[in-house]
Image: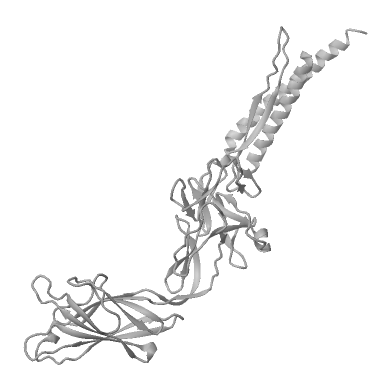
Amino acid sequence: MTISSSLNAGVAGLSSNATRLAAISDNIANSATYGYKRVEADFQSMVISSKGGSYSAGGVRSSTQRLIDERGSLVSTSNATDLAVRGRGMLPVALSSEVEVGNGASQMLLTTTGSFRTDAEGKLVTESGLVLLGWPANPDGSVPEFPRDTSDGLEPVQINVNQLTGEPTTQINLGVNLPATDTAAGSSGEAQPLSVEYFDNLGKSENILVDFTPTVPAAGSSNEWTMTITDSAQDHAVVGEYTLAFDDSRSSGGTLLGVTSTLGGAYDPGLGSIIVDVGGGPMEINIGTIGASNGITQLSDSFAPLSISKDGSPVGNMLAAEVDENGFVHASFDTGITRVIYQVPLVDLPNPNGMVAMDQQTYLPSPESGSFFLWDAGDGPTGDVVSFALEESATDVAGELTDMIQTQRAYSSNAKVIQTVDEMLQETTNIKR
């Protein structure tokens, strides 16, 4: 019985060390695989309780675990959509074969790095067929709220290069100085014109013409102007008319004192803005707050458009896309503007090593890994997203070769045990001849 248990223990030792060698060979084979997580083999002794003077060998049992929470070094690349996670968290991806079939939502897989490039449909896909997933942004670049404990809101990140897009203008900021001398008695009363371009809902260029006409008194200075706004989209129809009064005190000289509306939306003293209806809809025009010099002022003797700004953009072609550290996908257009089109969250779990390992360095959440949660990159426990980078394999070749030597010695020793047991059994059979 004791000799037989020794034989069984030797066989178990061979099997366990063969398992360890398989893990080592897998790690070395993937030492150049981006995002590879090494496998570690562990041994547990098996003890068979015995009474008396005899002892039975229980042998050994092996188990393996993939160390998904170990991270490799990051290396720089030249592709803007080469992505790697620096710190905790994983990128959500899906198999392109499932995405193309389109039978409901694709199963979410997780990975820590990937070299994504656009396919024929503009989706960001790796050479191995992994599609990057993200939340789509609104047309204005804001990302709506999505549920964080499910992958239902995620969809393939699609970048349509050469796609035409434009944004209508909804706000104009006027920073203009009006000449104080024009409101003095004896001045010509000539209007000061100002043309500001804006973009309508179809991306066409239109203009609002703002005429500043001074009120010329019989004596002294009125410090008053009439601001008339016309819209080119409506055949230069008048869409707003306002009376602007300016302060001439020592402390607030040249700033707005009051705004009276004759035509158009009322002046909002809190925001310092008026709203007029142009061809495409309401347009907010910021002229400055009462007593402040942040908008229209009346100083000196010169008319000076100091600061004219607006939102919106003309129609332009998408040129490229990049992912920032917070996971926002920014599209760049040839008009010089950028817009957020997707947000890629980072997925975190209580026990990453409990996930099920799949092909292509992807992992599937399981009951052992715990429930996942979708975080904004850089928020909560997660790290950030690094573009122009890939994560190297977590394999340490020198360490694996050292383990291989130890495994080889252990395997040879167990084989020697089996050989010794065989010789002892042979001696036993030779007792009777």
What residue appears at the point 38 percent right and 89 percent down from the top-left corner?
Answer: 234
Can you say which quadrant of the picture contains the C terminus? Answer: top right
What is the quadrant of residue 210 in the picture? Answer: bottom left
**Rendered location of residue 34, percent (x, y):** 58, 48
Is 316 placed left or right of 259 in the picture? right
* Identity of the residue furthest to the right in this view: 433
Along the viewing direction, whichever of 218 and 34 lies nearer the viewer = 218
> In this picture, is 225 found above or below 12?
below
Query: Residue, x 71% and y 10% (percent of image)?
Result: 51
Q: Examine the rendering and report whether any part of residue 394 can be seen.
A: no
Image check: 379 left or right of 34? left
Q: Is residue 163 left or right of residue 282?
A: right
Work out whether residue 196 can be spotted.
yes
Pinpoint residue 179: horizontal percent, then vertical percent.
16, 82
Extreme-left residue of the structure: 219
**Residue 91 location, x and y as percent?**
54, 52
Q: Quadrant of the N terminus?
A: top right
User: 54 or 432: nearer the eye?
Assistant: 54
Instruction: Count how many numbered circles sit on residues in the image.
Output: 0
Q: Please determine whether, in this image, residue 326 is positioned above or below residue 231.
A: above
Q: Is residue 261 above or below residue 82?
A: below
* 39 lies left or right of 197: right
Q: Residue 9 location, x and y as percent? A: 73, 21
Color theme of the render: one colour
Locate residue 26: give its quadrant: top right
In front here: 315 or 350?
350
Q: Is residue 398 above or below residue 6?
A: below
* Residue at image coords 14%, 76%: 254
